[in-house]
Amino acid sequence: MKLIKYTAAATLLSGAASAQGLFDVNPNESDDESSPLRYTAGVSFGYDDNVNAASAEESSTYVKGSLGANLVVRGEQTSWDVNAHIGATNYFDDVRSDDTVYNGGIALNINHRVNDRTRLVSRNFFNYGLDLGNFYGPITSRQIDEYTYFSTDNAIGYRWTDRLGTYTGIAYSTLDYDGGSRDVDSLSVYNQFRYTLNSQTTLTATARYTMSDYDTTDTDRVTASVGFEHRLSDNSSVVAQVGGQFGDKSSAYGSFSYNNRVNSQLKTRVFARYSQEDTDTIFSGDRYEDKTALRIGAAADYTFSPQITLTLGGNYTMSDYKDATALSDGDWDLFNIYVGATYKINDALSVRASANHTTSDSNVIPGRDYDRNRYELGVNYAF
């Protein structure tokens, strides 16, 4: 039951899925128990057959090092968690002007019950590097140079009656390409009404106003949606919303997520979202005024034994581009699938292997037709 109580409060931020990602931004989302501060150091060797995926097709072997930290605190009044990592990848072959690329990120989430009626929820995410990963949402494809992405979503929840409650919040995100013309800042304010239908189901109605600022222009948008959150069991839940987005360009809006800890061995996650997006809209100095995207993905973790865990996942993004000054209307399809396995030698040491395939296809966006395969073998040490 603790899991459902925490997850319901954490996922009620309807903007979090939009601004921060679809899942995996917070690796501790489904953890209902505290865990002590733990560090993980890793080194891996890999092969990438298309390092500069949006540019010339060149392959290279590489070595990567990383250091991460994770802490989960679950209390009756305050729950919070933090996950952070830093790393560097060095390519052995001469495929980039700078053979070493750097990455780092941190996710900080706080859920505080002020009293029986009031709750504060904050979700914060920062990332620097080439790849956010297709699950995260803000970036459709791999970039040539490192960039910075930051988002924060903060809300106050208040229970007006035993059945009716509201969450009122403000969210901000920034995407910085180190001086590039594609930078975009977004600020949102929103309010969500929540009505408890029964012990398993909560109905929701959300209104959100978003202002997005580019280097040369800005856009305003209102998103209105209705939906529900349904607890299938103590360890599984479904969250769904449907509505519309209104502004200079209007479209339908919908999102769906399903999380299930089936048993001690199997954990599954599924998402789908259709919405207007403000990133990846500028190409060759021209900007598309209207971009809608459908994102679908799923992942599963299966523990065969205390030593062996298998991870399998995939995602698909279909983006539709319209209304640019010089560029033609068109679409962009991106498909990604991965599989990984971890063998735990002891409580501290583990070996992992993974394979990842990406197919990108566009009939109008320059440099977005490519295939990419990555293979990696590494060792992690936790302490």
Image: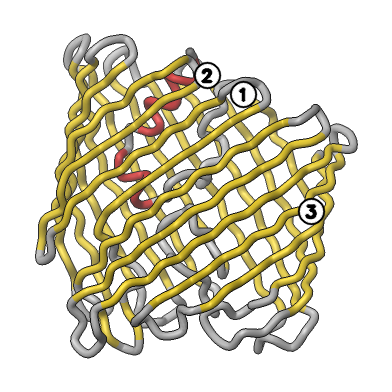
Q: Nearer the viewer, mark 3 or mark 2?
A: 3
Which residue is disc 1 drawn over? 34
Instruction: Say what secondary structure mark 1 lies in.
Output: loop
Q: Name the foreground residue: 296 vs 175.
A: 296
In the rendered image of this protein, does residue 84 appear above or below residue 133? Answer: above
Q: Residues within 10 Å of mark 3 (few under 14, many from 20)?
A: some
Q: Name the foreground residue: 303 vs 3.
A: 303
Which of the two labelled residues, at mark 1 and mark 2, occupies the earlier sequence position? Answer: 1
Identify the residue at image location x=30%, y=49%: 171
Instruction: Say what secondary structure mark 2 lies in.
Output: loop
Q: Quadrant of residue 173?
A: bottom left
Q: Quadrant of residue 5?
A: top left
Which of the two labelled residues, at mark 1 and mark 3, occupies the earlier sequence position? Answer: 1
Q: Please give left or right for residue 45 compared with residue 77 in the image.
A: right
Badge 1 vs badge 2, beta-carbon distance below 8 Å: yes
Give how far across and how far down residue 199 sits, in percent.
32, 10
In the rendered image of this protein, does residue 316 appear above or below residue 140? Answer: above
Determine which of the numbered discs, if any, sits on residue 75 in the image: 2
Which of the two labelled residues, at mark 3 and mark 2, occupies the earlier sequence position? Answer: 3
Identify the residue at image location x=44%, y=75%: 177
Give how far across and how far down residue 195 sits, in percent.
20, 20
Give how far across and how far down residue 98 sits, in percent.
67, 84
Amino acid type of the residue that numbered disc 2 sits on in the rendered structure: Gly
Q: Please give left or right for residue 291 compared with residue 268 in the image.
A: left
Q: Please give left or right for residue 192 compared with residue 22 in the image.
A: left
Q: Residues within 10 Å of mark 2 (few under 14, many from 20)?
A: some
Q: Nearer the viewer, mark 1 or mark 3?
A: 3
Amino acid type of the residue that numbered disc 3 sits on in the rendered structure: Gly
Give how far across and how far down residue 180 sits, in percent.
40, 82
Which residue is disc 3 drawn over? 42
Give the distance between the C-alpha atoms of the residues marked 1 and 2, in whole angstroms.
8 Å
